[in-house]
Image (cartoon, rainbow, N blue to C red):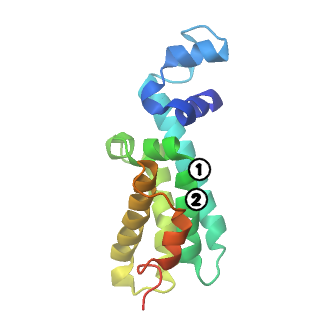
Amino acid sequence: MRIARDQIAENGAHAVSLASLARLAGVSQPAPYRHFADRDALLEAVATEGFEEFAAALTAAAGGRDGAVKAMAFTYVAFGEANIELYRLMFASRLVPDAGTGSALETAAVDAFNRLRGALSATTPADRVDDEAHLIWAQLHGLVMLKADGHIRRPLAELVEVSSLLNPS
């Protein structure tokens, strides 16, 4: 899976094939099929691993302290900037929406989102947690994608610092 992640980081998920990965790994062309049914199964596994790492980073950032949501926001944009092609696979592909209910990918994606919901629940009325979580998630996602596509040139941490969603007046 390391070779797949390296190829995704270098060329994007669209350029990954099981045959090319087999060549790079120095194994026979059918060898990857012992681990993955097809290319989509490989990409799902990579995205699942990405969401698990992302959730762990969000949890570490929150650390159960005041300012957890803002710390998570900094971590969110840093993860996206540092792993843009993995991030695109996780958030800008059909993998998660098409994942089966209860699949490892869906579970990992929901778990990552629930980290933000959990941090918000400490300071936000219960009936507003989901709405606030979606607004913050969307804002952070938009920042990462705009930066990745060249529309934002400055460090995203600067924008998180001044965000009105994260710094209500």
* Residue 169 in the image: above or below residue 44: below
Of helix, strand and loop, which one carries label 2?
helix
Instruction: Indicate whether 140 appears above or below 95.
Output: below
- Residue located beneath label 2 in the image: 78
Query: Can you name the residue that lies furthest to the bottom here?
Result: 169
Location of residue 90 in the rendering, given as x and y in whole percent from the top left corner = 45, 46
Q: Position of residue 100 (x, y in %)?
A: 36, 42
Where does label 1 land, which residue?
A: 82
- Please state which amino acid type lies under the numbered disc 1: Ala
Quick check: 141 left or right of 22?
A: left
Q: Is residue 143 left or right of residue 81?
A: left
Q: Residue furthest front?
A: 153
Secondary structure under the numbered disc 1 in the rendered image? helix
Question: Where is residue 46 shown, x and y percent of the image?
Answer: 53, 37
Looking at the image, which residue is at 54% across and 10% down?
A: 30
In space, the residues marked 1 and 2 are separated at their CA atoms by 6 Å
Q: Quadrant of the C terminus?
A: bottom left
Considering depth in this image, is 45 or 152 the residue closer to the camera? Answer: 152
Q: Residue at x 60, y 12 (%)?
A: 23
